[in-house]
Structure formats: C-alpha cells, structure tokens
Image (tube, rainbow, N blue to C red):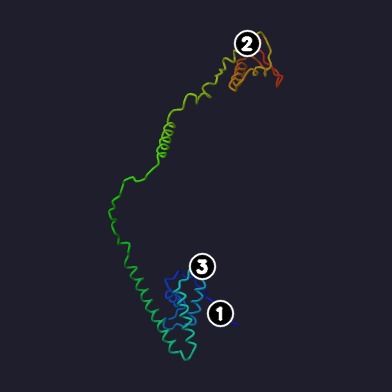
Amino acid sequence: METTAQISYKLPVFEGPLDLLLTLIAKNKIEITDIIITDLLEQYMEQIKQMQEQELDVASEFLEMASRLVYIKSVSLLPKYEEEASQLKQELTGQLLEYQLCRETAGKLGKMVSFDNFFREPSPVEYDLTYNRIHPSSDIANAYVSAVGRGKKKLPPPANAFSGIVSKKVISVSSKIISVMRRLWHGKKVKYSELFVASKEKSELVATFLAVLELVKGKRVRIEGDGDNATVKMTEEKL
C-alpha cells in the first residue's frame, strides 16, 4: 500500500492572502491558470492552521479568502452551477496574475530605487530657555544644607581624628634595654616572663622582646632553661 507523504512548509509572514496563494502555487510548480481549487484549498487551510498554532494573528482577509475558496469548491461540485464556478475561478486567476505582475514589478523597482537617498534637512527650532518650574522654599534650604555638607567633606580632618595614632606613647628599644639591665644588676636572676608583666601595650611588649634579643646578641645577658622556667641573667663578664 502506497503512502503519500504530506509536505509541510515553514513560510515567512505573508503580505496578504494572494501572496500566500502565489507561494503555494510556486511550491507546487504549477501554472496559475491550471490551479485546482480543491488541492489549493487544502494547502491554504493547512497554512492558516499553522499560523494559529504559532499564535500568529490571522487577519480577516485571510479568513475571507478561505471562505471564498470553500465557496468556489462547493459550487464546482454542483453541475448546474458549473458556469458560475468557472467564472469565479477566472476572477481568482485574474487577481493572482495581476498581483504576481505587481509583485515582480515592485521587486525590480526596489533594486533600482533606494529611498535612503531622499532626506529632509531638519527645520530650525527656537527653544524657550526660560526656567518655569516652581520650587517650595524648603527645597532651597535643603539644597543649601547639602552644598555646605559637600564643602565640609573637602576640608582637612581635625586634629582629634589622629588622636588614636599620634597620642600613643612611643616605647624605644634602648629604654627597655636600660630597664632590663637595671633588673639584672648585681647578678640578679629574673624569670623571662616577668620582664613582660609591666608591659601594658603591644608596643611595649615588642620593645621589651627586642631589647632582650639585642642583649643576648651582644652577649650581655643569657637565657637559661625553657618554657615557663626560663630565666634571664647577666653574663659573668658583665657583672
């Protein structure tokens, strides 16, 4: 059993029903004068269905042409209306031939003429630069306060802004060396951890640590033991 494959077309947007009919005739490779209304109607309705499935707005002229094709098909099936059917088909054929000629002529003219070559110079326009807006008095006050605030941002910061940096006491390593030597004078032995008890700030702790390192490096003191039991004492040659 032979099966006939149904051909489906993905056609562009048509300018009208005659444009759609000419496209279908071209797809079937038949002459306009030899069209068969029955076959043309089936393909035309298939395209209308595809438009509706793709949620495209189907214009009333497309539906009107569908009704016209249905009427021509119905009349052609009745023998006593054969003359009317022939006349209706001739009118449709004439419209298709005329539309085809117009479309071909428009295509040729479109290649010959470019409407981009025609332009119009802009007309001079007089602008009214008068400021006509009315503002409440509060807007002026707010604008002044805002402007003053922006001006303050450009001023240098006050001295108290640096109090957290400048006001801190600077502890020198040399002063801590003297302090450690005084505690170890006359052969005293002090726990290493006790040297940092009096330090209240990080800078003082660091200075004390560097002072001990400097004394050890210069062989003026030595550290005995380790951990919590570590002690510091002056070397014998410095006693």
Q: Position of residue 7 (x, y in %)?
A: 52, 75
Q: Residue at x 51, y 67 (%)?
A: 55
Please identify the residue farthest to the right as the structure is shown.
229
Q: Does 211 sit left or right of 116 as displayed?
A: right
Instruction: Name the amino acid, label 1.
Output: Thr
Mark toward the start of the polypeptide (3 vs 1): 1
> Dot 3 lies on which element?
loop
Quarter of the figure with residue 118: bottom left
Residue linked to disc 3:
55
Front in this rendered view, residue 222 or 178? 178
Q: Please name which of the two marks, 3 or 1, marks the residue nearer to the observer.
A: 3
Q: Position of residue 153 (x, y in %)?
A: 44, 32
Instruction: Name the amino acid, label 3.
Output: Glu
Q: Which residue is drawn at 61% across and 20% down?
A: 200
Q: Residue 4: which disc?
A: 1
Q: Do the residues labelled 3 and 1 touch (CB within 8 Å)?
A: no
Residue linked to disc 2:
182
> Dot 1 lies on which element?
loop
Q: Which residue is drawn at 27% across and 53% down?
A: 124
Instruction: Name the amino acid, label 2.
Output: Arg
Front in this rendered view, residue 54 or 187? 54
Mark 3 Cα-neighbour bin, 10 Å: few <14, some 14–19, many ≥20: few
Q: What is the CA distance from the residue labelled 3 to the residue labelled 2?
A: 98 Å
Q: In which quarter of the image is the N terminus?
A: bottom right
Mark toward the start of the polypeptide (1 vs 2): 1
Q: What is the CA distance from the residue labelled 1 to the residue labelled 2?
A: 115 Å
Q: Where is residue 112 in the image (x, y as percent from the top left)?
A: 32, 68
Front in this rendered view, residue 118 or 148? 148
Please identify the residue farthest to the bottom as the structure is shown.
80
Q: Where is residue 202 in the image (x, y as percent from the top left)?
A: 60, 23
